[in-house]
Amino acid sequence: MSAPGPYRLANRKRGDSIEFRFDGRPLRGVEGDTVASALLANGFRVVSRSFKYHRPRGIFSAGIEEPNALVQLHAGAQSIPCARATLVPISAGLEVNSQSGWPSVSFDVLRVIDFAHSVFAAGFYNKAFMWPSWHFYEPIIRRLAGFGRAPTGPDPDRYDVHHAHCDVLVIGGGRAGIEAAKGAGAAGQRVMLVEQDGLLGSDATSLAGLASIQVLLRTTAFAYYDHDLVALAESVAVQSGTRLPRERLWLVRAARVVLATGAIEQPLIFSNNDRPGIMLAGAALRFLSRHAIASGREVVVATNNDSAYAAARELRQAGVNVAALADTRATPPRELVEEMKALGIDVQPCSIPVDTQGFGALKQVSLGTLASDQGVSNIRNVRCDSLLVSGGWSPTLHLFAQAGGKLRYAENARTFVPQTDVAHIEVVGSAAQGSEAPGVLGERVSPIGNKDRQWLDLRHDVTVADIELSVRENFSAVEHIKRYTTLGMSVDQGKVGQAPAAEVIAHSRGLRPSELGHTIFRPPFMPVTLGTMVGRNVGALYAPFRRTVLYGLQASAGALFEDYGEWQRAAAFPRSGESREQAIAREVKLIRNGVGIYDASPLGKIELIGPDALDFADRFYINDLTTLKQGRARYGIMLRETGVIFDDGTIVKLSDDRVLLTTTSSGAGRVASWLEEWRQCEWPDARVVVTPVTEQWATVALTGQHARTVLQRLNPKCDLSNDAFSHLGFRETELLGSEARIYRVSFSGELTYEINVPSSKGAALWTALLDAGQQFGIEPYGVEALLHLRMEKGFLHIGADTDGTTVPDDVGFGKPAASKQRHYVGKRSLTLPESVRPDRLQLVGLASEGRTALPVGSHLRLSMGNAPTDGWITSGGLSSTDERPIALAMLRAGRSQLNQIVSVHDGGRMVTRACVVPPMFYDPSGARMNA
């Protein structure tokens, strides 16, 4: 709907003309316009419909607080729902559509709901739509709501994520923010100044010459997290489809944060205070000064503070007729009244709007005189097409509250202000002062009128009557009122109407506003697109494959790759015509009878560096590390605080201040993070640095009875004899002209050397080993063969043979865990009654009575048991020596069940029987790996 009311002033400077479309209609704006200002300039009064009653709504503000003018941008996969028209710059060809209203936003037949509004009071949905279920009604209600349409196709635009550090982060580019940035920059500090608008304040020129200040415009600080991490959303490309990213997420860590976030103007509350043409006075002043747009031809200003007088003055000087200025205060400042009289503006003290008229847009406002008995008299009507309201200013303290700051209701400012200080945060400017306006604020809620028509939340159609109903139904706490009525939810989040709402709630409960408290401010402060949060982590980058430096060589050898944790690894190397299972069996025999190589690069590698390195490591393992000597490796198990097994690997003492840990492939990242968390949060005085180095080293395991001979042919600069380099030995040496770290450890039960070289040398090592071992028929083998080899040895596979309840004694490590005298993480939990129950699941071996396979995951039943299950098989396969089915299993009180027969159940039926045996089927003495 358009009308002759709002217009662009012809005598003001204008920019280049830009054509865009609104609801299919071609319109023109000028350079620098937002969608909101351009719609006002083109005479559009109605731009949306309200959520519940489908009442016509116009542009109410000029910034982030806009509750009404939510529009749909672009089309197809680039479509953006619920964009605030006040924040979107127009661009050539921009497609803008209203989100509600059928058949159009100017004529919505669903307005009939408004005439039955008493039926749809707060809580109506919860009471009426219980049968047959909410989901039956939900699709209909969502279609009626008019909250936009999410695109269904892939987003063609690009998004970026940046990380930054600074000494001072200043949020807000007004006068206070610029002064804070200038002071810090002059002191030589690194400063980031962010402003959600496209322009800084009028003092921006004072920042010239300060190179240490980085300015980000059109950037909103939307979240404040622990450790002074602030998340920013930057709108980069104005027009979709450009080469630039559309939006950029900044994750900023700052030593100090200055909140110069300003204040948000609050409305006045009276009957029918939602009509198109009613606007915040500060917004009207902004549209006038920045876009040369007047809010109307016949304007009434209603205020309870000084700030709205500036809007009246500027409009009158621009040639707009200001029919009246109603001030709820009995004695407005004399100098302001005299100034208004000189401009021909009638100032009416003790006056407040009580109602408005106009079906589609504002036509008339009814003003009343406030009486001493809290009533209103002398009601008179003033014709106008624009009513500018100001109910004071509420500090923008969302980020302050997210950072842990406490707020209190200040009676003098009649709004929430900071109550406590927060370390590293400084609140400046109007964000710290409460109301910008000097003096005492007047009333902001009309004492008379139809409370069903007095709106507190323009987006969700929440009225004063809804608040009173909520209190009557005993939903009286502010948290309950918010959820019962949806007050301040959705796009508002406590921006517009927070202060008036506190007064209404307090009045309904017979309390003072300062006795209420407030709801929690949660991030985000402003809506953030999913694209901004995700950045480039979409498509193939959503969960990118991790491949070792040996991937290409293994692929050329015919590797069958599968995902193991984060990595794509060779499961097996099937030959032509060979199945996966046949390849695995062949590779197992290769290792048992010859020699092979295996890519072990994903094994986690973490260096601890510092005087307390060994002491720090000793706090995490059930094994005693204090006796560990340089040049030796020790196997160790880590526990969670609950005593549950977390990870395992080896520990090597490189020197007095350097320790090298290995972890499982899937545990590399989480173990490093876990160690770092303990270092920072529990033992900050530990003199140690945790450095993950997994990707810096390529690791090739050379395995089998000929392994020593093959490695000797590469002439390492160390003695490989068994006496000099025995099992669990470690050497830092030189190999193929490069530094190398060689472990003599075995996960297969055979003689094995795990050779680590810099990643850039990995391919050369792989090729050299294959060349050196040709005489012995050397070939690569995959993960599945290794897992079978370790199963035959009874070696633990974390995550397969353990779960979230397994403690060390369950898998045979109870004695070392108990014998270590020093405290370690999880030790105390091992003495809990649950951890020492005699009927716990324990690791055992199973040997099938016949030739029937023992399926992994099958459940076990003891002959005398009556429980639904007495355990299950964790690993299984055919023995490499006699091809009989064998398995590892977790069995109730398993070590006391040796030589007992269990039944194996799979798919709801018993498939075979098996004998409980010790969990080691191959070379129990360890002669092979100690050779």
Image: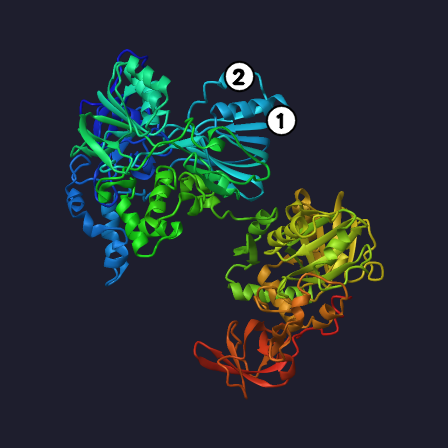
What amino acid is at disc 2? Ser
Q: Nearer the viewer, residue 161 or 615?
A: 615
- Residue 314's tag is none
Q: Of the residues under marks 2 and 1, which one precedes in the sequence?
A: 1
Q: Quadrant of the C terminus?
A: bottom right
What amino acid is at disc 1? Gln
Question: Given the current orientation, which residue lies at the most extreme right position?
Answer: 723
Measuring 19% from the left and 31% from the top, which residue is drawn there? 379
Left-right relation of 311 to 597? left
Q: Residues within 10 Å of mark 1 (few under 14, many from 20)?
A: some
* Disc 2: which residue: 206
Measuring 64% from the left and 72% from the top, which residue is drawn there? 832
Q: Nearer the viewer, residue 63 or 70?
A: 63
Dividing the picture into quadrants, the one containing residue 388 is top left
Give residue 808's position: percent from left, percent from top.
66, 69
- Residue 189's tag is 1
Left-right relation of 435 to 60? right
Looking at the image, can residue 713 be seen?
no
Q: Nearer the viewer, residue 868 or 798?
A: 868
Look at the picture and state if 300 lies above or below 736. Answer: above
Looking at the image, can residue 440 be seen?
yes
The residues bearing labels 2 and 1 have C-alpha atoms spaced at a distance of 16 Å
Give residue 851's position: percent from left, percent from top.
54, 80
Left-right relation of 212 to 326? right
